[in-house]
Image (cartoon, coloured by chain):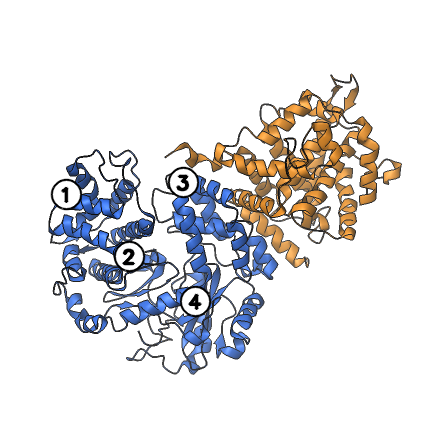
Chain colours: A orange, B blue
Amino acid sequence: MPMTAEVFPEIGFFQRAATAFADCVPTDPADDGFFGPASVTWRLHTDLTAPVSGLRSLLLQALHPLAMAGVDQHSEWRDDPAGRFASTSAYVITTTYGDRAAARAAAARVRKIHEWVTGTDPVSGKPYEASDPALLIWVHAALVDSGLVAADRYGLRLSDADKDQYVAEMTAAAELVGVPPASFADGGAPASVAELDAYFDAVRPSLATSRSTADIATYLLNMPDVEPELADVWDVLARAAVASLPGWARSMYGFGDGGPAPGSVPPEREEVRQVLGVLDAVYLAEPGALEARQRLTLRMREAGQ
Amino acid sequence: MAGAAIEPDPDGQPGSTGGRSPGGKLNEPRLRVGRGLAAMRLAARGGARYAVNAPRLFAAAGERRQQLRDDLALRTAQDVADTLGTMKGVLMKIGQLASYVDDGIAPPARRILGRLQDSVPPMSPELAAGVIREELGATPEQIFKEWDPLPIAAASIGQVHRAITADGQAVAVKVQYPGIAETIAADLRNVALIKSLLKMAVPSQDVTALIEELRERIGEELDYLREAENQRQFAAYFDGHPTARVPKIIDELSTARVMTSELAAGARFSEMLGWSQREKDLAAETIYRFTFRSLYELRAFNGDPHPGNYLFEPGGRVTFLDFGLVKHFKPDELDPLIRMIETLCIQQDHEGFRRAMEEAGFLDPGAPIETDEVVRHMSLFYETIRERGPRTMTSEYASAVARRYVDFKSPLAAYAKIPRSYVIVQRINLGLFAVLGEMNATADWRGLSEEIWPFVQAPPSTPMGEAELPWLARARR
């Protein structure tokens, strides 16, 4: 049997993300957690576009030098990128779908780890602390914005009211990890699309690229762990994520409008959805992933979604 | 086959509630159907003892399909598009296509494609009723005396409902997912992605040939009228056959997206495997006769020889289901295959066999290979029919044939290929060997073949052959 026979299971990325999903979607939750089956958050996070959203989110997050320095100096992403990605997925899944106790426990673990993540950004010479609310809001805002944008372009098209509702709901996630439970004006997380946009306008001067940024982008977009046969598939995903970035972020990276290469044409919605469907099929084949998806669907249906 | 048989007893006591009159017609269906429907549904959904027409499960052989999840049912055409569009419907078809060759599909891909089948829920009763309304012009309750709103099986890009017609006939109604044709058509236009997928799923196969086949098959399967036409043709040809049965199509209740046929009953393949070897041999003889009579007389090869496409009754009676894939041959396509058999098995003319292979396009003319080598390589495929006498089909033989089929290390590999019009024949052949091998069936296959081969037309070689005579006289007329 040729090497290609082993294509699918070698995608450590998807395998491990799927395992995290199967493990972190509760079977017998004590309560509906911080969002619940009737929330916009559940609707958006179960959308097919999650991989594009995740990729875009990471590309965006890497543009903050202090956030990037923290990841680079304290995590093992260069040695085990799939593992790093899976633990982030597990955290997001647990806080989204888990009951309150599970979400709080997961957040407490992350906050504990964050206590150790301090240092000095080698590029700017500035000190950083991962528990700094400013950094936590940056990571949070990138995640929330990416969920909205990826779905809007390639998947679920939320109404403006639902978009605002999503941003507002997600402040609960920000607070879990240590963002002050305050209004945006008083140092809390953005609670509407307008506040989210205002936040990005305000934070842009603090953003910069570095060698680490370039390294992580190269890794994410070229995905050396993917076999040649899947390279075309991954390429569509990468272009979809890049095309959905804000123009200023693409300029900072030196990307083209429709993908990493200058002059790229953005992929069509249809094409992106086809690729996402294939990846979803790969994902659902992992043990327990389909059942976890069905658990969520049933709870959402009961809640009238 | 006249009328339909219903055996709604989940414990498998034939006729305990359903019962057929000697003529094969339902007795007093009105009195029985209510209870019958409920019991039938339970039986079918629970243990899958019952098959109805075209219960082609998405899953390939050996893979268990999850029970139909009504609670997750697709409620709108948008649900259908989200679930089966985005390439997933096409992926499933790739899985089906690839499943004909034992060694052809990469195991991880097999797992993914198998799991994908499980991920497709049935349509909600309302959604299915909507398709009936659009296609037949009235609600299921208006059209049928009884309509089971819950499907009893998943079918190709649809699902099967059981119903009783206004005149009391028990039928299987195959209902297509709404909007699936458009969704799949859009996905099929992404040739680049489909090529990548085929390369991953069936690394040993010729992707260009497969992609054409995939398009054709999907096109055929989306059009139930075509399937109905095929089934009609087979039903007419085998009408009156002593052991082979094909459920009749109910014309007035069949459209492009709804296909209604007689409901059939019988034991599933797995259950039949527990019967006596004598019974299994008889069933195998029927399958063999059915397959090759169709090929030589109708010039049509039916469906895939998937164990799920047969229903068995004692005495070698087999009901054949699913005519979604029928390959029709032109005479000049069949002739080279016939010449290959004639030269190798009857005339033992090795050079003639080689020439026939070259004419059919299986072997490059002038390939630098000894003819004896060619014959040695190919004779495995003809092993069961080269000589008279009883032979037992085994799973080992079927696997050996499948391995030889995809053997790229053989000296022939560089010069051998399978012309596109024969790809399906080869696959179906392999599937047939696999089925007969699993049944451990013993017969004088050469004897049966001589009866069937149009260039021999030997007299009956078995009691079943004798019993076929009146039917054959009519069929040949």
Write down the quadrant of residue B326 in the picture.
bottom left
Inter-mark Cα distance, 1 to 3: 37 Å
Q: Chain of mark 4?
A: B
Q: Earlier in the sequence, mark 4 or mark 2?
A: 4
Q: Earlier in the sequence, mark 4 or mark 1?
A: 4
Check disc 3 and give the amino acid type: Ala
Q: Horizontal and vertical percent for residue A75?
A: 65, 24
Identify which residue is drawn at 64% across, 23% down: A215
Check disc 1 and give the amino acid type: Glu
Q: Are the residues flagged by discs 1 and 3 in contact, CB closer than 8 Å?
A: no
- Judging depth in this view, the residue of A235 and B153 nearest the camera is A235
Q: Chain of mark 2?
A: B
Q: Chain of mark 1?
A: B
> Which label lies toward us, 2 or 1?
1
According to the picture, the residue beneath numbered tag 3 turns out to be B106
Q: Earlier in the sequence, mark 2 or mark 1?
A: 2
Check disc 2 and give the amino acid type: Leu
Q: Earlier in the sequence, mark 3 or mark 4?
A: 3
According to the picture, the residue beneath numbered tag 4 turns out to be B225
Q: Earlier in the sequence, mark 1 or mark 3?
A: 3
| B90 is higher (above) or lower (below) than A83 | below
- Judging depth in this view, the residue of A262 and B447 nearest the camera is A262
Label 3: which secondary element? loop
